[in-house]
């Protein structure tokens, strides 16, 4: 299960890196984190928090190093 989540996050990072411009990636990551905070709602979920961190980490170097160290 743990490896499956990591693989999904990696695939999402690749898609976002290819399709979303650099300035919007950080904004998209912040939006995902904010939506994940209200994860008890039916449409959004707590899974959005780690995905938002991973997406935001594509543009923020210290955050990217932290994410890479956690793998």
Image (tube, grey):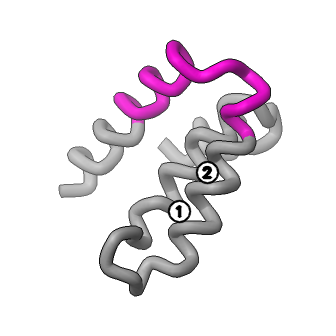
Marks 2/1: CA–CA distance: 6 Å
**Secondary structure state at the residue bearing disc 1:** helix
Report the side of 23 relative to 11 (left or right). Answer: right
Residue drawn at point x = 61 percent, y = 51 percent: 53
Instruction: Name the residue tied to disc 1.
Output: 49
Q: Does residue 15 sit above or below 25 in this rendering?
A: above
State the count of labels: 2
Instruction: Name the residue tied to disc 2.
Output: 53
Mark 2 surroundings: few (<14), some (14-19) or many (≥20) residues within 10 A: many
Q: Does residue 20 sit above or below 49 in this rendering?
A: above
Report the side of 1 relative to 57 (left or right). Answer: left
Magenta: main secondary structure = helix
Q: Give the range drawn in magenta.
A: 10-26
User: Residue 41, which numbered label?
Assistant: none
Q: Percent x, y for residue 44?
A: 40, 69
Q: In which quarter of the image is the N terminus?
A: bottom left
Residue drawn at point x = 39 percent, y = 71 percent: 45
Mark 1 surroundings: few (<14), some (14-19) or many (≥20) residues within 10 A: many
Residue drawn at point x = 49 percent, y = 50 percent: 51
Q: Are marks 2 and 1 in contact (CB under 8 Å)?
A: yes
Q: Percent x, y for residue 13?
A: 48, 30
Report the side of 15 relative to 26 (left or right). Answer: left
Q: In terms of depth relative to the viewer, which is nearer, 51 or 25?
A: 25
């Amino acid at each position: 299960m743990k490896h499956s989540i990591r693989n999904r996050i990696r695939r999402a990072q690749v898609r976002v890196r290819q399709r979303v411009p650099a300035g919007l990636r950080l904004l998209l990551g912040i939006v995902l984190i904010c939506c994940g905070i209200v994860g008890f709602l039916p449409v959004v979920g707590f899974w959005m928090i780690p995905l938002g961190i991973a997406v935001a980490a594509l543009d923020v170097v210290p955050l990217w190093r932290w994410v890479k160290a956690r793998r």
